[in-house]
Amino acid sequence: MKKNLLVLCLLLFSSILVSQTISLPEKELTAKLDSILKEANMLYQYEKAAWNGCDLAIANDEVKLGFRGYFVYQTDEGIHTIILGENFETSIAEYIFKDDFTNPYVIKTEKRPLSNKEKALISIRGKIIENISSDKYEVGVPDGFNLNLILLPFADLYKLYIITGTPQSDIIPFGNDYLFISDKNGNIESYKKFHSRLIPAYIQHDDKMIISVTHSHLRDNPLITATDICTFKLYAPLYNMNSFSVYSPAIGKYMEYNIIDDNIVLK
């Protein structure tokens, strides 16, 4: 297959807006982008641990037989992926990742009861999911895609990110992503839908390989998002891609993320 250097621009404009830029001091904008990048890397670590932990579980015939679900959380030891057994009451396998999120440094396949911390976190996740199941939030799953949930405790609250994944090849599934913030009991206090819809970035076009992708944000979501970067970091290595960008009409600039340098550059 002939590989040419192309840039596919996926421009998302759901309404016609008068182009006016928002002026942010460089220091403030840099601080915001640094915070977004930090959150993105945390999301990536959780989701990469989930991917590889579940792959290892499915590769183990005994664990696969009892596999009923999974949960990911963090301790001082690292990022834990636990495989849940019947009724989500036991852990039948556990994989702990720290510096290498492809290979766990701890693998446990002994059945054990869930710890109090694990029970509490899984319960909170369940309550948030129950609360967002109403039509009020309009969380949908497009055909051929799936939703991945990432629960992050912070202060006395919880963040539940929802990002879209896909088993399909040659697609990076940007968009259809959400953030719900709940109190300590799982009651939703606020939420944000980052993109107005799914933005599938197709990696082939007319039998030619795409090397970079771009999409545009509306004014109410002016910056590149942690979910954008997390999704790219998960899928880009499958296609030897190193960068993508988001155009913001609100600030009149492109924000380019480079996976090798792990940074965001304004252009």
Image: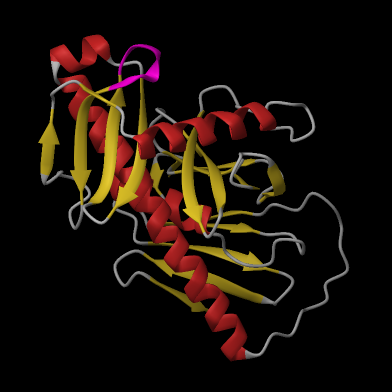
The colouring scheme, among rainbow, by chain, secondary structure or one colour, is secondary structure
Residue 109, picture quadrant: top left
Image quadrant containing the C terminus: bottom right
Q: How many marks?
A: 0
On screen, residue 11 versus residue 70, left or right, reads right
Q: Is residue 247 visible?
A: yes
Residue 29, picture quadrant: bottom right
* Picture layout, residue 227 above or below residue 185: below
Identify which residue is drawn at 34% across, 64% down: 259
Q: Report the magenta residues as a range.
A: 85-90
Identify which residue is drawn at 14% across, 19% down: 60
Q: Position of residue 88 (x, y in %)?
A: 38, 19
Residue 196, picture quadrant: top right
Identify which residue is drawn at 58% across, 72% down: 254
In depth, the one of 170 and 128 nearer the eye is 128
On screen, residue 114 versus residue 155, left or right, reads left
Indicate whether residue 88 is drawn in magenta.
yes
In depth, the one of 135 and 87 nearer the eye is 87
Q: Position of residue 116 (x, y in %)?
A: 36, 35
* Picture layout, residue 16 above or below residue 267: above
